[in-house]
Image (cartoon, rainbow, N blue to C red):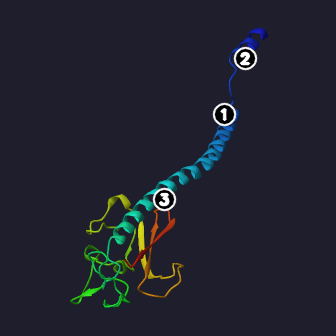
Amino acid sequence: MQISRLGFYLRHKGFTLIETIVGMVVLAISFSVLTTLIYPVSQQSADQLHQVKAAELAQSVLNEIQNKAFDENSDMAGGRVRCGDAGADDCSTDMGPDTISGVEETRAIFNDVDDYDGLVYAAGEIENSQGVVIDLYLGYSMRITVRNDANYDGSFPNDISTAKLITVTITTPTDFSMSFSTYRANF
């Protein structure tokens, strides 16, 4: 009779409740370690995508600004009359949108580089040059500054008739700020 019991016990081996619980705890710990290793990698890959989109947005805005006249008193057709030249009007010292007949200019009618100074878009409000919100950049914010910088070293103020430093700062949805700068010379 004892032989049959022994055979019965040998044929029905399995895990005990304690062994099963220990196995589940070991799996839970290993999964938590794996997820803490994988999450930063996924975050970094998202950051790269945001940085590329920020660079595209900044390049687009900088191209738009570069295509405007150097100054309110410059020839809008492209260089026959430059502000500050002999016989021409002096360059404007006012940065930011001009006021025409008591109404401040909007981006849709900006006509010179310094009109963009102080232009700020909060997250989810970035518009194209015609005032339409761009859905592609939801969560991004943008700030534009324009400063006179004749000696091209980033120090202000100096000669107002030679060059302007344009800086576009884009903040991604993950709060990573990137600044893009270019110069617009008076020609």
Question: Which numbered disc, 3 or 1, marks the residue closer to the eye?
Answer: 3
CA gap, disc 3 and disc 1: 47 Å
* Callout 2: SS: helix
- Structural crowding at the residue carrying mark 2, measured as other residues with C-alpha within 10 Å and reported as few (<14), some (14–19) or many (≥20): few
Res 166 visible: yes
For mark 2, what is the residue? 9
- Which badge, 3 or 2, is on the more N-terminal residue? 2
Tell me which amino acid carries mark 3: Gln
Identify the residue shown where x is 43% and y is 58%: 53
Identify the residue shown where x is 51% and y is 65%: 176
- Which badge, 1 or 2, is on the more N-terminal residue? 2
The residue lying toward the viewer, choosing from 74 and 97, is 74
In the depicted structure, whether residue 19 falls above or below residue 97 = above
Residue 28 falls in image quadrant = top right
- Which badge, 3 or 1, is on the more N-terminal residue? 1
**Where does the image place residue 7, in percent across and percent down from the top left?**
74, 11
Tell me which amino acid carries mark 1: Thr
Residue 23 falls in image quadrant = top right
| Quarter of the figure with the C terminus | bottom left
For mark 1, what is the residue? 20
For mark 3, what is the residue? 51
Identify the residue shown where x is 23% and y is 90%: 102
How many marks on residues?
3
